[in-house]
């Protein structure tokens, strides 16, 4: 099985991102309950949270803060908001 990677993100307002994964799943993830622990405390400030970008197949914020794509995928499925699945691109 291929590793799950984040392929695209789109801001959806305070502490929410639409995320698309390499397996074709996309949806909206609410981070308000996921930003626990000292490393994520700065991301509760929207200005810091909005620095999110996709690098090396995962979600990264300024200050070398990131979250594993598998964790993001699992949490998005659990929340179940706006889930869609397209056929993943086949790379030959």
Image: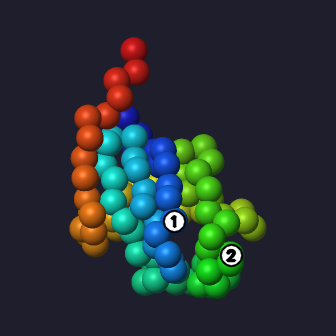
| 72 to the left or right of 76 | right
* Residue 25 seen in the figure: yes
Work out whether mark 2 precedes mark 1 in sequence or the reverse, and give the earlier one. Answer: 1
Residue found at x 40% / y 21%: 91
Percent from the top left, x then y, of residue 55?
62, 48
Of tags 2 and 1, the one toward the viewer is 1
For residue 72, what is the image quadrant?
bottom left
Q: Nearer the viewer, residue 74 or 89?
A: 89
Determine whether the residue tagged by mark 2 lies in a helix, strand or loop. Answer: helix
For residue 76, what is the image quadrant?
bottom left
Q: Residues within 10 Å of mark 1 (few under 14, many from 20)?
A: some
Q: The C terminus is located in which quarter?
A: top left
Reading the image, the residue beneath label 2 is: 48
Reading the image, the residue beneath label 1 is: 11
Percent from the top left, x then y, of residue 89?
35, 29
Whether residue 3 is situated above or below residue 11 in the rendered picture: above
Residue found at x 68% / y 78%: 47
Percent from the top left, x then y, of residue 31?
46, 76
Percent from the top left, x then y, of residue 27?
33, 60
* Residue 74 seen in the figure: no
Number of dots carrying numbers? 2
Alpha carbon separation for disc pair 2 and 1: 13 Å
Q: Residue furthest top?
A: 92
Q: The N terminus is located in which quarter?
A: top left
């Amino acid at each position: 099985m291929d590793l799950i990677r984040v392929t695209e993100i789109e801001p959806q307002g305070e502490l929410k991102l639409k995320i698309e994964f390499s397996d074709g799943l996309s949806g909206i993830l609410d981070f308000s309950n996921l930003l626990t622990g000292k490393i994520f405390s700065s991301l509760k400030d929207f200005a810091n949270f909005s620095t999110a970008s996709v690098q090396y197949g995962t979600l990264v914020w300024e200050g070398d803060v990131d979250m594993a794509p598998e964790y993001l995928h699992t949490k998005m499925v659990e929340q179940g908001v706006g889930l869609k699945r397209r056929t993943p691109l086949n790379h030959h």
